[in-house]
Amino acid sequence: MAKMSTNFIEREVFAEIARRVDGTPFGDIDTVYGDLSRLVVAWLAKESAEDLRELYNKLGWGGKANARAIHEAAKMWMKTHRPEVSK
């Protein structure tokens, strides 16, 4: 598998690839990008660090992702910004 040369989380990269089904770009990229960010944080907070590490390796990205730090940071964000759903 080819190594990713760009970082999807960068807004400019996301804006280049975010398209509707018909191929046209989204008109309100800020809303879509913000929604994606919140969804990713929620998903990272719900998955275990072990499952995140397994997925990272399964996708062939190599190296040792610090899945524990990613998981803990996502849980802290949820606890701070969405305490009603961070159980």
Image (cartoon, rainbow, N blue to C red):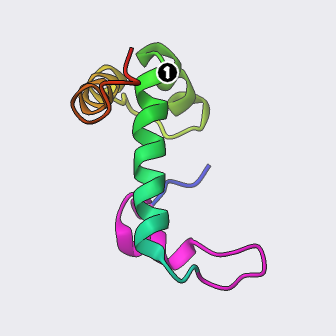
**Quarter holding residue 71:** top left
Residue 24 lies within the magenta run: yes
Q: In this view of the protein, which residue sits in the foreground, 12 or 53?
A: 12
Q: Are there few (<14), some (14-19), or many (20+) residues within 10 Å of tag 1?
A: few
**Image location of residue 81, percent across then percent down:** 26, 36
Q: In this view of the protein, which residue sits in the foreground, 1 or 25?
A: 25
User: Farthest residue toward the right?
Assistant: 22
Q: Predominant secondary structure in magenta?
A: loop
**Image location of residue 65, percent across then percent down:** 36, 30
**Residue at (25% x, 29% y) in the render:** 73
Residue topped by disc 1: 47
**Residue at (76% x, 73% y) in the render:** 21
| Relative height, residue 20 to residue 61 (above, below) | below
**Residue at (40% x, 71% y) in the render:** 30
Residue 76 lies within the magenta run: no
| Relative height, residue 24 to residue 4 (above, below) | below
| Relative height, residue 3 to residue 18 (above, below) | above
The C terminus - image quarter = top left
| Relative height, residue 87 to residue 59 (above, below) | above
Tell me the SS state at disc 1: loop
**Residue at (46% x, 14% y) in the render:** 50
The number of numbered discs placed on residues in the rendered structure image is 1
**Image location of residue 6, percent across then percent down:** 41, 64
Q: In this view of the protein, which residue sits in the foreground, 44 or 82?
A: 82
**Quarter holding residue 19:** bottom right
**Image location of residue 63, percent across then percent down:** 39, 33
- The amino acid beneath tag 1 is Glu
* Magenta span: 5-25
